[in-house]
Image (cartoon, rainbow, N blue to C red):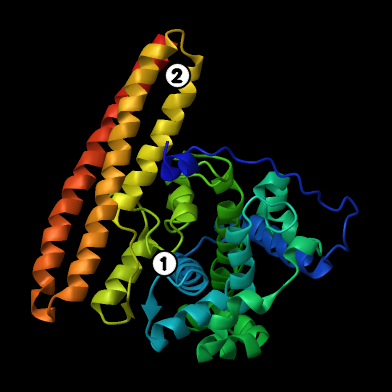
Amino acid sequence: MDTEISKAKGEISPNNQSVNEEKPPFLWIQASVFSLTFLIAAIGVPWYALAVGFEWSAIIAFILFLFATGLSITAGYHRLWSHNAYKAHWSLRLFFALFGAATVQNSILSWCTGHRRHHRYVDDNDKDPYSARRGFWFSHIGWMLRAWPSGKEDLSNVQDLTRDPIVMWQEKHYVTITWVMNLAPPLLVGFFTGDYLANLLLMGFARLVITHHTTFFINSLAHYWGRQPFSDQNTAKDNGLIALFTHGEGYHNFHHHFQTDYRNGIRWFDYDPTKWLIKACSWLGLAWDLKKVPKFKIREAQVAMQLRRAEAQIERASDAEKWQALLEQEVEAFKHCLEQWKAIRQATFEETKERLAATRRDIALSANEHVKALEKALKAQLDRLNALQLQLQMAT
């Protein structure tokens, strides 16, 4: 098989790197923040709900603040600054910097350097700050409770972000911004409604705990539970249910394979409010240069995965030779499709260089027609491979 298929079918190499057995120092400040906020939310919110009851104003303010802070992590810290999936106006960046600080998940620079290392060294126990291969608890919260060497801060991979004045302003005043953004909103709403305690419990503690653990579920649960339609080269999974609680971040298998795409849920019905927010901001002129992976490349990844799964099933089938012949036909069709894609891209590039600017639009239109035809061919092949796997399941 050609290089593309070989890569798609490559096995996950076992992680032979050892993790230091000696436990590093315990971080009491982080542990205290997580413990106290959780206890106050778990005890105080039910008590107040039963003893006094929450007004609708407090509930609505809680939901709005929850979304503002959560989306500042997913659309701001994550897709904008960690992955440069789009560009944003200074006012939108300022919003994300302020409300992102309210999540108490560290500054933009600190958050992004760890996340970029996670993508670069995913599942490497010695280099991935929250490697899922070290266990669910570690990847969820344990990695923040001790001074693990894998979590040591190194800003060398976020030098591009130091050119953003808003990022550097937040870095310099992070502690002050964090305190203000956690206290001012609930106290302000309490001033207008006359109920300070209710808003502190909901907007302060409950919101913070929910935002913490829904973010942490991406590092833990999204690497344990779900499907892998695009790649099995790491532990990342797609899970629509997780997406419901994480502002669309649950399509994690897609994200790890195509990390610069501003979307995580690529289908129109995928719940991804972060994607919708970014798109809406682009209509308002607040976001631009939204990066999208070509549909052909997405189909290519899906078909490569299905070819790999079909081969694994055929190895267990009793009449493997018959199924292997069918699979080889699909492999050849896949290779032919990839060759055509490369030829179209090369031809378009050469023609564009040679012709005048006035004719470039016609070249692009012609190439797009060919690419769409290839996308349809890959979709048809994906359907055939799905049917083939069902037949194999019945046969085995």
Residue 339 in the image, given as x and y percentages of width and height: 29, 47
Q: Name the quadrant containing residue 127.
A: bottom right
- Viewer-proximal residue among 155 and 345: 345
- Residue nearest the observer in this picture, 306 or 330: 330
Secondary structure beneath label 2: helix
Could you tell me the amino acid type at mark 1? Ile
Q: Earlier in the sequence, mark 1 or mark 2?
A: 1
Q: Residue, x 70% and y 74% (percent of image)? A: 154
In the image: residue 116, left or right of residue 228: right
Q: Amino acid at mark 2?
A: Ile
The residue that mark 2 highlights is 314
Residue 106 in view: no
**Circle 1 — which element?**
helix
Counting from the top left corner in percent of width and height, residue 193 is at 46, 78
Rendering coords of residue 239 (x, y %): 46, 44
Per the image, the residue denoted by label 1 is 60
